[in-house]
Amino acid sequence: MTKILSLYHIDIKEPTVCTIGNFDGVHIGHKALINKVKEDSLKFNTKSLIITFFPHPRKVLSPQNYKCSIVNFETKIYLLKKEDVDYILIVDFNERFYKKSPAEFMNFLKEKLNCRKIVVGKDWRFGYKKEGDIEFAKEYGKQIGIEVEDFGIISLNQEKISSSKIRELLLAGNVKEAKKYLGRDYFLREKVVKGDGVGKKLGFPTINLKPDDDLCLKMGVYTGFLEFEDKKYPVVINYGNRPTVDGKKIFMEAHVIENFEIEMRENSIVNIYFIDRLRDEKRFESVEELKKQIMADIEKAREVLGYVY
């Protein structure tokens, strides 16, 4: 079972094989790198360790260059835990940490985390002002007893798999194409919140979620599934600000398109899967027009999801 660690609670006594990164989206390139870490940890009879950060370093160091996140933090840790490594260290990315020099950072890996080997991507940069690179890590690693392996680049159809590419696709609403690079349907792990009852009044009750405000996903209407207690339910998902109703706050709400009985309370945890984008959000002149569009969305969702009734 994976053990979650923080900088304030590190109890690793065994040697480790480590990897370091933001792992936004935990895409197929990330998974290949993590598999290499697990293979090497078995080979050398050590423990496997993923080191990741919260918040995203770019959000702290250069917020003007920070676009958005593929998934929220809870989803990222959920996905990393499914990789079944021994340890995940969540680094509180604050000034005290990011001002470590490259040498100080490498010493931290050796002394605090018992890293004997590090597996990272070719373009890895680290230390204060990103002064450290893969070549420095290899040379300094030899001095302190850490092997550093450049894992190289993972490609799909001769195109580099990157979080940047996936962000572009999600910002365009192209969840179907993003799936190829993620290696799975795009989904978010979210907490159920209390809604205002608008959907129920319209005759389409919804399960209400509160998405992060920096999500890389184009607003609009999607179809997909809601997973709760190991069961999946077909849904129409509205992600946006409901221009016909109020247009003020950002909502994510899912309407189950069939008559399933779901016992769900506030603060329940669900996974919400986005299979395809149906349309943009738009403002309707009347509630009746909105209800007709919702019915059309439900029929389209059934078609996309392969449901025949």
Image (cartoon, grey):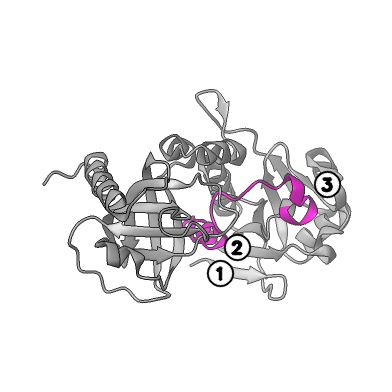
Earlier sequence position, callout 3 versus callout 2: 2
SS for callout 3? helix
Q: How far from the left and from the top, in percent, is residue 256?
A: 26, 58
- Residue 60 sits inside the magenta stretch: yes
Q: Are marks 2 and 1 in contact (CB under 8 Å)?
A: yes
Q: Amino acid at mark 2?
A: Ile
- Residue 172 sits inside the magenta stretch: no
Q: Amino acid at mark 3?
A: Lys
Range shown magenta: 59-85
The image's mark for residue 88 is: 2
Say whether residue 101 is visible. Answer: yes
The residue labelled by disc 3 is: 130
Q: How far from the left and from the top, in percent, is residue 143?
A: 86, 50
Q: How far from the left and from the top, in percent, is residue 195?
A: 40, 70
The residue labelled by disc 1 is: 3
SS for callout 1? strand
**Residue at the farthest front position:** 285
